[in-house]
Image (spheres, rainbow, N blue to C red):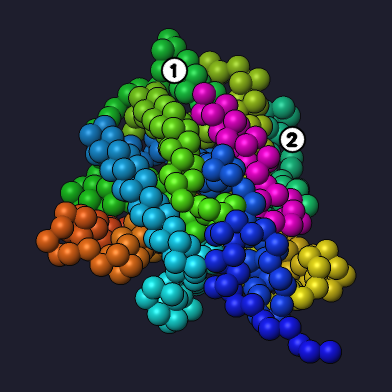
Amino acid sequence: MGAKTPISVDTMAKEKENGDGQVQVTVDLDAGALFVLKSRGSWWHCGYHLTTSIVAPSLLSLPFAFKMLGWVGGSVGLAFCGLVTFYAYHLLSLVLEHHAMNGSRLLRFRDMATNILGPKWGTFYVGPIQFGVCYGSVVAGILIGGQNMKYIYVLSNPEGTMKLYQFIIIFGSLILILAQIPSFHSLRHINLLSLTLSLAYSACVTVASLILGYSKNAPPKDYSVQGSAVGQLFNAFNGISVIATSYACGMVPEIQATLVAPVKGKMFKGLCLCYAVIAATFLSVGISGYWAFGNEAKGTVLTNFMGQNQLPSWLLIMTNAFCLLQVSAVTGVYLQPTNELFEKKLADPTKKQFSTRNIVPRLISRSLTVIIATIFSSMLPFFGDLMGLIGALGFIPLDFIMPMVFYNATFKPSKRTFIFWINSVIVAISSVLAAIGGVAAIRQIILDAKEYRLFANV
């Protein structure tokens, strides 16, 4: 009996692009791409995935970013980051479409770096950064979910004695179940619900801010940027990092990989759907929250709402419940690059996806991934400060720098063209923002270090 000729990953990608859904499975194929990044979705599904990865409870920190930047700086930063990320994600999709049309469909961020810039870029730079920001987002998501559960508990039972780490463990158990969903495409209905929930809690936050802002006992409104000149400078860069992290995705190639071939034009439609939701949510929450609280805006606007007698408890409970449900979907999405990585290492592509050989390592690896993230969330409830550092040194390079580098390296536009120079300018500005934002985030961590305590009940 003769051995079958192996099919390369490039050949598989080409067959996918030509619309052939049946691809022969051989030892040369990648289990992570085959099992986790199934190319079966429409542009609608792509839009749901994009929206869930970007429109997350981190947007509730936008009033805090305005506090550090002021009305003008906050508004300009919000608009600038929105335009740049939309442009960057579109450039990424064009590069991916170009390779797909040439018979080499790239399914992962590290594949793009390896194919376009060389193997070391994928192995030692893009791959580790993407893993760090995505897994960091999982840790942050479990922490936020635990905080939402605690808020609901305190509102319902003010004399309760349960601690934050207990709620984090409960929420981590929910994510442990959600992590077993087999593929990115399988999340499409959950992510549609997530899109709806993000609109719902953004509307609740806006209404709550307006109620407080117009109440007789409204909090004092001071919109001046406070601190020394050096402090204002560092705070400004920290605020930009917060906004940049709110727009961050970190997995655009993996999301585009879920599209059924041909992929041309589909990602742009998905981006338009996503940014329509972004416009509705980011603007309403950022502006209304800063208008209501000014310089009193906390790290998340939900913290400002706690203890406000002017707000009905049912509104606060509903807002936190919507956030709780949506952050579970966000955490599930950011688990996908980690799931894909372990699936590639541990699964056997020559066996069926749900064979015992593949189910056992999948169950163990995904469970350990969530358990470790839950432990970190319980130990480090101040992880928000660390996310500022992750955003500056992780999300900004992935979402503000690499798309332009990939585009210029792939299409090689003339140095006389506008697109070459606009890409180069964005790379230069983003590099400076990443460097200074990283320093500002480290400075903030040092300033807050005296308040840090493992398993703190914050």
- Residue occupying the point 30% across, 38% down: 79
Q: Provide the residue designation for mark 1.
A: 210
Residue 124 belongs to magenta span: no
In the rendered image, the residue lying farthest to the right is 356
Left or right placement of residue 144 versus residue 65 in this view: right
**Mark found first going from the N terminus, 2 or 1:** 2
Main secondary-structure element of the magenta-colored stretch: helix
Element type where label 1 sits in the image: helix
Residue 290 image point, x, y percent = 37, 29
Residue 96 picture quarter:
bottom left
Instruction: Name the amino acid, label 1.
Output: Leu
- Residue occupying the point 59% across, 61% down: 16
Q: Which mark is residue 160?
A: 2
Left or right placement of residue 308 versus residue 354 in this view: left
Q: Residues within 10 Å of mark 1 (few under 14, many from 20)?
A: some
In the figure, 77 relative to 92: above or below?
above
Element type where label 2 sits in the image: loop
Q: Nearer the viewer, mark 2 or mark 1?
A: 1
> Is residue 320 something one can see in this rendering?
no
Q: CA distance from mark 2 to mark 1?
A: 30 Å
Q: Nearer the viewer, residue 15 or 436?
A: 15
- The magenta stretch spans which residues? 178-203
Q: Nearer the viewer, residue 318 or 401?
A: 401
- Residue occupying the point 69% across, 56% down: 183
